[in-house]
Amino acid sequence: MSNEQVTRDQAEPDQAGPGQAEPDQGEPDQAGPGQAGQHYFTASPVAAHRPGLVHVVLPDLHFECATDAGVFSASRLDAGTRVLLEAVPLPPARGDLLDLGTGYGPIALAMAARAPEATVWAVDVNERALDLCAANAAGAGLGNVRCVPPGAAELPGQFTAIWSNPPIRVGKQALHGLLASWLGRLAPGGQAHLVVQRNLGADSLQRWLQSQGWTAARIASRSGYRVLEVTSR
C-alpha cells in the first residue's frame, strides 16, 4: 500500500459509473481525471497556489480554516465531512485519535476541540494539506493536533478512535487495503466513523467490512451520505 493512497478525495470508485457523483462530493473547481492524481495523490501538489478561507460552522464549533488549491474541497466544507461531523458521537476524552486523510484539517480540529485532553493525529500524504492543517490548528489554539504523513515514525501503534472521509478515488481494492491497515490499529473497544456517499459504494463497503470481521453499522444517512460506525475486531 503506497503512502500516496492516503488523502481525502471522495470521487468515483471502480464500481461507480460516470455521472453518479453528486455535486457536493468534490470541489466545484476540482481538476479533471488526468490531473486529480497530481493534486491529491502526490506529496507535493503541482497546482498553483490559490489561498482561500473556509468557515467551518457546526452546532458546537466554529473554525476559520485556510485552504489552497491542490487540497480537497478548498472552496467549502464538503457535504460528506459536514454529515460526519454532525453525526458522530463525542470522541474519547483521552488517548490517541486519528483523522485519516485530513486535508486542511476540519475533522482533526473538530476532534481536538471536542477532546482537548486527547492527542489527534492528522494524517495525509499531501504536504500542502499538512501545512495548512498545522496552521489551522495553531490558529484555533489547538495544541493537541499532530499533522504527519502516513509513514511518520512517531505515529502510535493503536488509536482509540478513527474518523475519516476516506479516499474512494483510489479504487475498491486499494481502498480495502488502506482501511484494513488503519482499522487494524484500532485499540480494543475502539471505534471508527467513516462517511461515504451512497452512490459511490457506501453499502457495499459496509458489507465488505462486515465480511472481514468488523462490526459495521450505519448510524446516519443524510444528503446521499452514509456514516458507518466500525468497531475493532
Image (cartoon, rainbow, N blue to C red):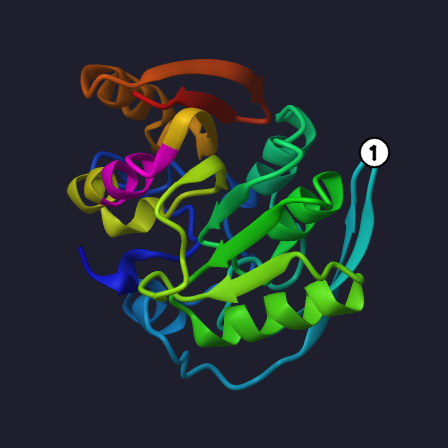
Residue 28 picture location, percent across and down: 56, 57
| Type of amino acid under label 1 | Pro
- Determine if the magenta segment contains residue 56: no
- Relative to residue 92, is residue 107 depicted above or below? below
* Residue span colored magenta: 178-186
Can residue 156 be spotted in the picture? yes
Considering the whole magenta stretch, tell me its main secondary structure.
helix
Quarter of the view holding residue 154: bottom left
Residue at 67%, 78% in the rendered image: 51
Can residue 69 be spotted in the picture? no
Q: Is residue 66 left or right of residue 170?
A: right
Residue 189 picture location, percent across and down: 43, 21
- Relative to residue 212, is residue 102 depicted above or below? below
Residue at 30%, 26% in the rendered image: 205
Q: Is residue 75 left or right of residue 138?
A: left
> Would you name the residue on which mark 1 appears?
59
Quarter of the view holding residue 173: top left
Q: Is residue 102 left or right of residue 59?
A: left
